[in-house]
Amino acid sequence: MKLKATDIGQMASASEVIFEALREAIAQGDVKEGEALRQDHIARMFNVSRIPVREALTRLEEQGLVSTQRYRGAVVASLSIDEIRELFEFRALLEPEILRYSVARMTDEALAKARRFAHAFATEADGARWGELNRSFHYALYEEAGRPYYLQTISTALDRVDRYLRAQLVLTSGMERARREHEGILDACIARNATLAAKLTRDHILGACDSLLDFLDRQRAGETGNAAR
């Protein structure tokens, strides 16, 4: 039998492609809080039936990025101030611990990779890429821990707050502080000082949380004031 075979086992499914596209659009803020995600419209955009769209939306809802509302269907979920605070507090418990595991096993290659991402983050002019590079830097430090469930859980938490964190980096002075703190964390890892690296990571996360919540308080207060006029 003569066939031009393609290894479809290595190809992403339609629902996976749509899931990733929607997840990134939500994280970037290209799709706003409360915006409806119409299955028929998305299906036409990707030239597919509604089945893979429905599958992608179900996954997004499981991650807390989408919610289903009566009469509106799937919409981009929003987070309250308390929910955001809880997610950052959770990260501040988990991420320092995975870094403790990682430091002792960290190779020179892993440290070089983290340094490249720290440099890319510090020198990137396009604010739309800051969130992605920030995540890549931290992941480069965490991956050597050999704790895939930790990483998966951290990834899910980051997915839920990414759009807020990216806005905070772009619209406040958070970028310069993040650059300095990344360097401190990386230096502690190079020195194999797991205790210091974990402390700096915890301070980094909670500091970003305080800055973000202050930013959102002012932003939402402004929106409420404008609506009242």
Image (spheres, rainbow, N blue to C red):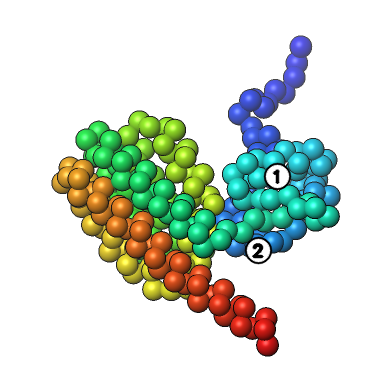
Q: Is residue 49 above or below residue 225?
A: above
Q: Quadrant of residue 15?
A: top right
Tell me the SS state at disc 2: loop
Q: Position of residue 114 (x, y in %)?
A: 32, 48
Query: Which residue bears the numbered disc 1?
Result: 57
The residue closer to the viewer here, 43 or 109, is 43
Rendering coords of residue 118 (x, y %): 33, 56
Q: How many marks?
A: 2
Q: Residue furthest bottom?
A: 229
In the rendered view of the protein, which quadrant contains the C terminus?
Answer: bottom right
- Is 96 displayed left or right of 6 in the figure? left
Q: How much space separates mark 2 and mark 1, taking CA atoms?
A: 15 Å
Residue 32, labelled with which disc? 2
Give the SS element for disc 1.
Answer: helix
Q: Position of residue 52 (x, y in %)?
A: 75, 38
Amino acid under disc 1: Leu
